[in-house]
């Protein structure tokens, strides 16, 4: 299943002209992985069995702003302050932020359908 990143109107415009807009961003959930991308700025392929918890609703702290921001293993990929979901990941996932490899322990996302995303992750997979 694919889930859209939530964008507010002002940031949607800025993200689109800088290559991080809705057409180049999203979250795909497969039986084995959760793949997150925001244009050129963020790419992650997180094994589903590494996701220890899904918190929804979650508030993305204002200091993270919008776009791709983080440090110390905690990152936010968001285009809006609404639709917050927080993933706790163990072991930390290898990701790329602006083409630089980093490890992510906590990932906060803004999604158009946060409840459906959380329900999908809570559902059992068909993988044996």
Image (cartoon, rainbow, N blue to C red):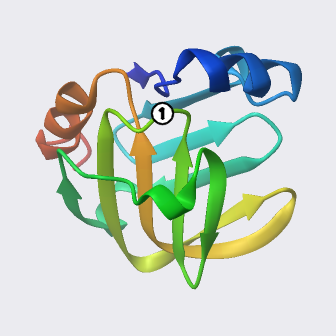
Q: Where is residue 119 in the image (x, y as percent from the top left)?
A: 14, 34
The residue nearer to you, when weighing 1 against 100, is: 100
The residue nearer to you, when weighing 63 against 30, is: 63
Q: In which quarter of the image is residue 51?
A: bottom left
- Residue 107 at least partly seen: yes
Q: Which residue is drawn at 46% across and 56% down?
A: 62
Q: Residue under label 1, please give it.
A: 80
Image: 21 above or below 33: above
Is 104 on the left or on the right of 95, as rendered?
left
Image: 21 above or below 62: above
Is 127 on the left or on the right of 23, as rendered?
left
**Which quadrant of the rendered structure holds the N terminus?**
top left
Q: Where is residue 64 in the image (x, y as percent from the top left)?
A: 55, 59
Is 11 on the left or on the right of 84, as rendered?
right
Image: 29 above or below 72: above
- Residue 33 at least partly seen: no
Neighbourhood count class around disc 1 (C-alpha, 10 Å): few under 14, some 14–19, many 20 upward: many
Q: Which residue is drawn at 68% across and 49% down?
A: 43
Image: 96 above or below 1: below
Q: Which residue is drawn at 52% across and 56% down?
A: 76
Q: Position of residue 5 (x, y in %)?
A: 49, 28
Q: Which residue lies most toward the bottom here? A: 72
Label 1 secondary element: loop
Is 11 on the left or on the right of 87, as rendered?
right
What is the total number of numbered labels drawn onto the structure image? 1
Q: Which residue is drawn at 53% across and 24% down?
A: 7
């Amino acid at each position: 299943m694919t889930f859209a990143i939530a964008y507010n109107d002002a940031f949607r415009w800025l993200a689109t002209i800088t290559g991080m807009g809705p057409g180049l961003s999203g979250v795909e959930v497969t039986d084995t992985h959760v793949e997150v991308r925001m244009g050129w700025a963020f790419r992650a392929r997180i094994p589903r069995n590494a996701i220890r918890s899904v918190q929804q609703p979650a508030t993305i702290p204002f200091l993270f702003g919008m776009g791709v921001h983080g440090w110390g293993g905690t990152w936010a990929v968001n285009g809006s302050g609404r639709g917050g979901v927080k993933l706790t990941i163990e072991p930390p996932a290898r990701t790329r932020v602006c083409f630089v490899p980093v490890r992510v322990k906590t990932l906060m996302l803004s999604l158009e359908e946060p409840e459906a995303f959380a329900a999908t992750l809570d559902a059992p997979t068909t993988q044996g």
